[in-house]
Image (cartoon, rainbow, N blue to C red):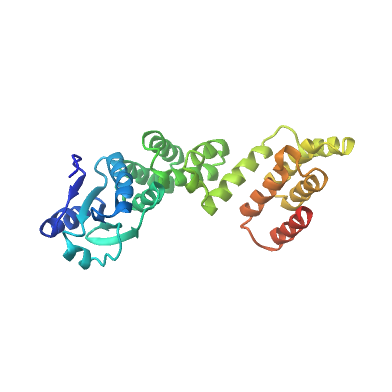
Amino acid sequence: MSDSPYIVDVDLDAFDQIVIENSYRAPVLVDFWAEWCNPCKMLMPVLHGLVEEFHGQVLLAKVNSDEQQELAARYGVRSLPTVKLFRNGEVVDEFSGVVPESAVRDMLEPHLVRASDEIAAQAMAAYDEGRVEESLALFQRVFEEDPGNHKVLALYGNLLAEQNQPERALEVLQSLPLEKREDSDLSALITRLQFSQHSDSEIDAAELESRLQQEPGDHETRYQLANLYIAQGEYERGMELLLEIVSLEPGFKDGIARETLLKVFDMLGGSGPLVSRFRSRLYNLLY
């Protein structure tokens, strides 16, 4: 048995008290395992580490399936390890086999009760009532005090973007783990914010166009101009310039024009006539 106050071995007699009753106060992970099960032993450090990290925000109940066959049968356990997440007396999520820590964290996160959630609720109420500065100050407090509250920070980044604070929004959103930033909506927002920085440049499109006319081989200027057009919502003009770079010098800055085009495609939703046309042209150039 673990020395941790957040990890306990559970039998049939104690299950309702330890798992069901506690699940009304906090999420409870139930780990169905057995001594002979090597994958179970591989998963255990992952579960133990997360539970310790959350300091009581989640409990871990360990059920030896060989000794507690009635419990395993009650919850339909067919393979080991099987982990079930209980909240408010019910199984709300589960998985079988060995999974990475990030997957367990993603399963837990929506069900965790965090002190910063109350601050975020106050912040959202203030925002809805038009007290924007107060709201953003409260969200900033969450950012500083509980950077692991990813769902709140994603919301904060979106609100900063709405308030035309792209640099601050990027700082908050890029603090999120990679797997969160790869969410299609967040990824598109981050890309849009990155392009918006170009629109704040002191150099305008006319000056860049003039430079490019004088030096047609200046791909750096062509790339800056493409980014500026995209930041201003002139996607077709920007993508035309990026395609020119791919055509004339595909290896420019390790293929940055191609990578930027792919980001624009994602930002525009990954489909539609404009994206399809330029995706086809890019493919023809490359292959």
Residue 25 in sight: no
Q: Quadrant of the N terminus?
A: top left
Closer-to-camera residue (148/254): 254
Q: Residue at x 21, y 67 (%)?
A: 73
Q: Position of residue 91 (x, y in %)?
A: 27, 61
Q: Residue at x 69, y 58 (%)?
A: 275
Q: Is residue 267 left or right of residue 177?
A: right
Q: Is residue 23 left or right of residue 259?
A: left
The outermost residue toward the right is 214
231 over 19 or under it: above or below: above
Q: Position of residue 251 (x, y in %)?
A: 75, 41
Q: Quadrant of the C terminus?
A: bottom right
78 over 105 or under it: above or below: below
Q: Quadrant of residue 67?
A: bottom left
Q: Residue at x 51, y 52 (%)?
A: 183
Residue 85 in sight: yes
Q: Position of residue 4 (x, y in %)?
A: 20, 40
